[in-house]
Image (cartoon, helix red, strand yellow):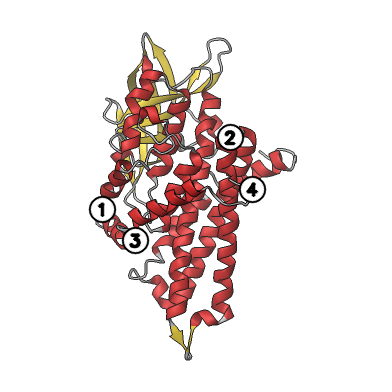
């Protein structure tokens, strides 16, 4: 970020090139794949081939050596072209960041190149059926058995397990000194004995599916543990701030896509001898969305800049606010886009209705708007803790 509040020329060029690449595919291609139950592997692999998938990962492991702001820009531009790739949030941003920061040299060599070129996609599993957003209550446990780890428990709402070779699982293990449970991060192959996953049908037009995962005494080698056994909480949050920044970028891209389509329609659609965009009832809501999107984009860029500068505390506050603002802006933008299209807003042809669920999920995942408000009330305003 420069003093003129614009991104660097390199970042802007990155956006242009990603938009150009994704534009070759577009929303119609994306939805056709999703409705047919097919994957968007061609786009995923082309992103990897061009160096955009691992742009935030160090160069020595096949990445671009950039920051979270760069991978967030890639995520946003893909969504803005109607091709939102949810696994961009998970594989390079969360898993890639955690492994690059805390993995051993052998782990980095083993997993990071595949995350960069698209051949080694990794999912992330933290959410559990009975824990909800209270990650301190997760019950998936990891216990030592000789030189191995034994993992048991279950996870829910895990994205892209069917496309991933491995899953970075958040579990808990006993602290030998205190007897209390502490979080640990383990990489689990999706073909490991005892690992099962079941598809959760959702009302969303997306090629990336959701799953419930069952871990029944899954045995893992000692080197499946990522980072320090006693530093799991710090390592976990190193992945959650990028997750929120990426979620904001995902929402912003969808918001921009909806607004662009609505604006184009408002210019072309003529009723009562004038384009409907000339009427304030249409123009003002779209202008309002433009303002909301730009404000959320600025907060997202601030969060990414703080994170890349190593200011974890300030980045945490900004990332939460960016995620909240972007999800709200996206929901409003899509709703207004549907309204602008009138009856066509409900049609598959114009592609607006399908965005309603996709953007609405942004208010819930990866962290609910209520938990963000709790965070801001307590940490930003200093109010008493409410939970």
Residue 185 screen position, x and y as percent: 45, 25
Callout 2: helix, strand or loop?
loop
Q: Residue at x 44, y 34 (%)?
A: 65
| Mark earlier in primary sequence (4, 1) | 4
Provide residue 252's location: percent of width, then percent of height.
50, 55
Q: Residue furthest bottom?
A: 273
Q: Name the disc covering residue 309, or none.
A: 2
Q: Nearer the viewer, mark 3 or mark 1?
A: 3
Badge 1 density bin: few <14, some 14–19, many ≥20, Cα 10 Å: some
Counting residues from the N terminus, which is met first, the one under dot 2 or under dot 1? 1
- Residue located at (67% from left, 44% from top): 376
Q: Position of residue 42 (x, y in %)?
A: 26, 48
Kindly identify which numbered label has been placed on residue 191: none
Residue pointed to by mark 1: 37
**Gap between marks 3 and 1, in whole Å?**
15 Å
Q: CA distance from mark 2 to mark 4?
A: 16 Å
Q: Which residue is mark 3?
A: 27
Extreme-front residue of the structure: 9
Q: Closer to us: mark 2 or mark 1? A: 2
Residue at x 58% of width, y 12% of height: 178
Q: Few, some or many C-alpha atoms within 10 Å of disc 4 (few <14, some 14-19, many ≥20)?
A: few
Per the image, the residue denoted by label 4 is 3
Q: Using the numbered discs, state the Cα–Cα distance from disc 2 to disc 1 in whole angstroms.
A: 41 Å
């Amino acid at each position: 970020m420069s003093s003129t509040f614009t991104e660097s020329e390199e970042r802007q060029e990155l956006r242009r090139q990603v938009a150009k690449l994704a534009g070759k595919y577009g929303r119609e291609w994306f939805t056709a794949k999703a409705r047919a139950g097919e994957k968007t592997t061609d786009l995923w692999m082309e992103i990897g081939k061009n160096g955009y998938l691992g742009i935030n990962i160090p160069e020595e492991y096949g990445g671009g050596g950039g920051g979270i702001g760069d991978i967030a820009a890639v995520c946003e531009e893909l969504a803005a072209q109607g091709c939102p790739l949810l696994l961009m949030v998970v594989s390079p941003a969360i898993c890639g960041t955690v492994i690059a920061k805390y993995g051993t040299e052998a782990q980095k060599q083993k997993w990071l190149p595949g995350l960069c070129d698209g051949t080694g996609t990794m999912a992330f599993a933290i959410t559990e059926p009975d824990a909800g957003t209270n990650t301190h209550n997760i019950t998936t446990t990891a216990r030592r058995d000789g030189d191995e780890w034994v993992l048991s428990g279950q996870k829910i709402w895990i994205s892209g397990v069917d496309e991933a070779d491995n899953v970075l699982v958040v579990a808990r293990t006993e602290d030998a000194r205190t007897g209390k449970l502490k979080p640990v991060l383990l990489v689990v192959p999706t073909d490991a004995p005892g690992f099962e996953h079941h598809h959760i049908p959702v009302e969303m037009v997306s090629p990336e599916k959701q799953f419930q995962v069952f871990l029944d005494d899954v045995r893992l080698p000692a080197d499946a543990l990522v980072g320090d056994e006693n530093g799991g909480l710090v390592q976990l949050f190193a992945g959650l701030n990028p997750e929120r920044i990426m979620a904001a970028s995902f929402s912003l891209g969808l918001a921009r896509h909806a607004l662009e389509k609505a604006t184009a329609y408002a210019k072309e659609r003529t009723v009562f001898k004038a384009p409907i965009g000339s009427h304030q009832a249409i123009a003002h809501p779209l202008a309002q969305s433009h303002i909301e999107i730009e404000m959320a984009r600025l907060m997202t860029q601030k969060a990414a800049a703080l994170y890349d500068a190593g200011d974890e505390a300030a980045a945490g506050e900004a990332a939460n606010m960016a995620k909240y603002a972007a999800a709200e802006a996206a929901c409003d933008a899509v709703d207004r886009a549907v309204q602008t299209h009138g009856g066509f807003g409900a049609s598959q042809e114009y592609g607006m209705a399908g965005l309603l669920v996709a953007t609405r999920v942004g208010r819930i995942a990866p962290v609910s708007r209520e938990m963000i408000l709790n965070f801001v009330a307590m940490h930003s305003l200093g109010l008493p803790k409410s939970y």
